[in-house]
Image (tube, grey):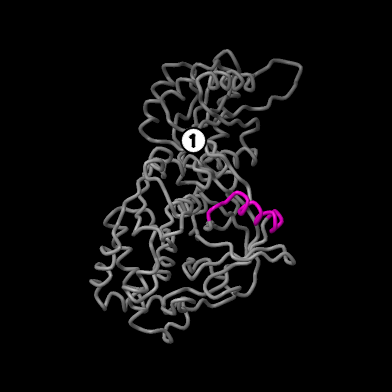
Amino acid sequence: MALADMKVALIPLGRPTFDTALASQLVVEMRAQLKRAGFTLLGPETLLSSVDEVEKVADDLASRSPDLLLVFQATFTDGTMVVRLAQTVDAPILLWAIPEERTGGRLRLNSLCGINLAAHALTRAGRRYDYVYAAPDDPAGIEQARAIAGAGYVRRLLRQTRIGRVGEHPAGFDTCRYDPDALKRTFGLEVVPIPLDRVFQAVKMVPLKEKEGVLQALSTKLDGLDRLGLDALLGTLGTYVALRRLVEQEHLDGLAIRCWPEFFTELGCAACGAMSMLSDELRPCSCETDVHGTITQLILQWLSGEPAFGTDLVSVDVKDDAVVLWHCGLAPLSMADPAVRPRGTVHSNRHLPLLMEFPLKPGRVTVARLSEATGSYRLIVGTGEMLRAPISFSGTSGLLRFDRPATEVMATILKEGLEHHISLTYGNHVPALLALARMLDLPVLRL
């Protein structure tokens, strides 16, 4: 995610009985630091010192949906202006106060006392907030703003999200159950039911020339396509074209797909390769109609600006203190280890193409899961290092060393009865995930 995608409303507050010259200089510095960090800035460039001024700004911001309301307490003020902002603008609030040198002379700003009053007023009003007590150029403060704005950005996008659910989840896969009404209430998103037959009919209508064009482009990225059954291979590529068209027609952000057994038995191909290509295009797909998995992938994708991958934990290596994350072959190709050329292959059980086969690239990863194992939503969060390793099993796999012992991670998953799918993306996005959980009232379970 580019910081420029996040809209930060900077609201500088000050009272004329304090050192407004110094306060105005600090506002200029704060704006410069946020712009340098890459944020899109909303709000006034000069100090606000009255409720009337704040109300005009708040009315304008309310229609622009900022991802973060950064109240910059340039000098002391009472809590009235902050409460008015909070009443009008639906955005997470970050109170920022400036440390002041002890000179033995005048208290020029009294900024900390200002956010103390604001914090009390917001608490009485039932509004959450975070705070920073640092100079405008403090890197930790900017990172905290980034995490909260990122969470606000995800919250905004969730309210606009449409997930396509293709078919029903397989019998016995209660881990893929979902409640559309609860998702709407909690996140604001919509699940769009799509019959499998509609997709199958659309796949059959894809022109051969269009499928051959996809094959030609894919052959530059994958080895082994010439060794696969052509009819089945073209079936997967037709599935990709049909699903991509469906995403565009229905304005979908992601898909949860019943990938078996019907794709094998009725269409004669695997859906995995098609889902891999769509996920690489930032239209994440989950197999087994795992709606919560697709939502998790979207959250991770929005935070990282890169694709996310829904996977199973299939093995724990006590000796290496690592786990194997694996799935049939639907990981996005951008996650492939650059030292290994990916290849096309067949499903290990159904023996039909197209699946992607490669080991995941090494690097820092964040794993997450929107879980409903207890009957109410929780956010599962973990971090670790993806290790460079050969493919553990056919398909796509990675050897992950969590930041906690592997046996503890396994014990948490099994004792808590968590779902069998977990999603990952590259980078450390835990601060933003924790901020998002606070905004949505989601308990957090750490892996």
Task: Specify the quadrant of the image occupied by residue 433.
Answer: top right
- Expressed as whole percent of the image width and height from the top left, the position of residue 236 reads 36, 73
Instruction: Name the residue tied to disc 1.
Output: 68
Above or below for 337 versus 10: below
Task: Specify the quadrant of the image occupied by residue 34.
Answer: top right
19 displayed left or right of 319: left
The reply to whether the magenta stretch includes residue 409 is yes
The residue nearer to you, when weighing 329 against 303, is 329
- Please state which amino acid type lies under the numbered disc 1: Leu
Q: Residues within 10 Å of mark 1 (few under 14, many from 20)?
A: many
Looking at the image, can residue 447 be seen?
Answer: yes
Residue placed furthest toward the bottom: 227
Q: Residue at 49% x, 58% y: name it.
A: 306
Q: Secondary structure at mark 1?
A: strand
Above or below for 315 versus 109: below
- Expressed as whole percent of the image width and height from the top left, the position of residue 393 reads 57, 74
Q: Residue at 65% x, 69% y: name it.
A: 388
The reply to whether the magenta stretch includes residue 382 is no
Please give the range of residues in magenta. Answer: 403-419
